[in-house]
Amino acid sequence: MLGNFTYCNPTRLYFGKEAMQGLEKELPKYGENVLLVYGGGSIKKNGIYDQVVAALKACGKKVFEDAGVMPNPTVEKLHEGVERARAAKADLILAVGGGSVCDYAKAVSVSVHCDEEPWEKYYIRFEEPTCEIVPVGCVLTMVGTGSEMNGGSVITNHAQKLKIGHVFGTEVFPKFSILNPEFTFTLPKYQMIAGFYDIMSHILEQYLSGTDDNTSDYIMEGMLRSLIHSAPIAVKDPTNYEARSNIMWTATWALNTLVAMGKDTDWEVHMLGQAVGAHTDATHGMTLAAVSMPYYRYIMPYGLAKFVRYAVNVWGVDLSGKTDEAVAAEGLDRMEAWMRSLGLVMNLTELGVKEDMIDGLVKSTLVMEGGYKVLTPEEIAQIFRASL
């Protein structure tokens, strides 16, 4: 490992079938006003809402609600949430949902007491909070983003055709998160498999970078193998607790900052996917799936040794009698076959992207410098066209 780093993750996790007991342990630590944040109302149909409200009332909390958080939270919704939190004088923001709800709660938390426009401050200038931060807790109902144990917060500005993530410091991490794999059982298949690929993409963004012998790479190979094994089981039987629990735990560790320590990281797939999301509002994990194979095949020659290692250690490709290029290509072929077997979206056309949108997508794509190839606008356009 080559990097110098300081590592701290302050989020307390409660995991398993009895994880909700942790909510009543955590709530007394905060004031009486709780802003309950959630999405479209599915938590009312599956009973999770009732469990959460019962815990809040048992702890004597005053509950204020902010519902309707969309899968790609917008800057307009952020403004609405800030006003709701201010009106409630929120002492705690409790996010109940998937990564978008958790992301949104963190964006609200740093904006409630901010006297500047949060979009400009946090998502354009990438400044850090200088104001009081309202603490956040999470009850997770969908896995994928790892937002339950990190400082990431992605907000979309449709007017500017931008979807931008700000990775805040540890002071913005959720103070606690409740992870009961059973809460993910009723998620529709499309959302479930999109989340599965989001997990894989998070790992690969960190794994497919750097050339040093790095402990994190060994950890990530294990996480990838676990996900590759468990995902088809969960697709066949969504209530398989063993598979869903392994996937939930992998999702958390994929992006809780641990495996990024001491490494360069890429994140260009996310920049490509987020540009697509800003223009189409498509599901995040599916935008990543649609651009991944063209991107990885394009950059493979620039990081060939790692792609060979990926093929052998993750996908079990046999080295015998093959060139490095052939081994690496076979690994990507096996990855693509696995993705197709899950039912992931494999092209941008299915997400509504047309040829005449390419120039706009290129302009909306941020260029990262941590991967094996720093892309030019022309190369970004080439990858988008290959993804159609």
Image (tube, helix red, strand yellow):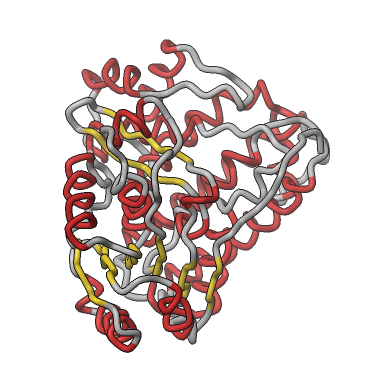
Q: Residue at x 45, y 55 (%)?
A: 147
Q: Residue at x 45, y 74 (%)?
A: 29
User: Based on the displayed image, in which of its 4 quarters is residue 40 positioned?
Assistant: bottom left
Tell me if I can see residue 338 in this picture.
no
45 sits to left or right of 322? left
Q: Is residue 78 above or below residue 195?
A: above
Q: Quadrant of residue 36?
A: bottom left
| Residue 76 visible in the shown view | yes
Q: Residue at x 37, y 69 (%)?
A: 141
Q: Would residue 22 be found to the left or right of residue 87 on screen?
A: right
Q: Position of residue 327 (x, y in %)?
A: 71, 36
Picture layout, residue 368 above or below residue 269? above
Left or right of 192 on screen, residue 260: right
Q: Nearer the viewer, residue 205 or 24?
A: 24
The percent coordinates of residue 107 (x first, y second) are 34, 47
Q: Which of 248 and 100 lies nearest the eye of the viewer? A: 100
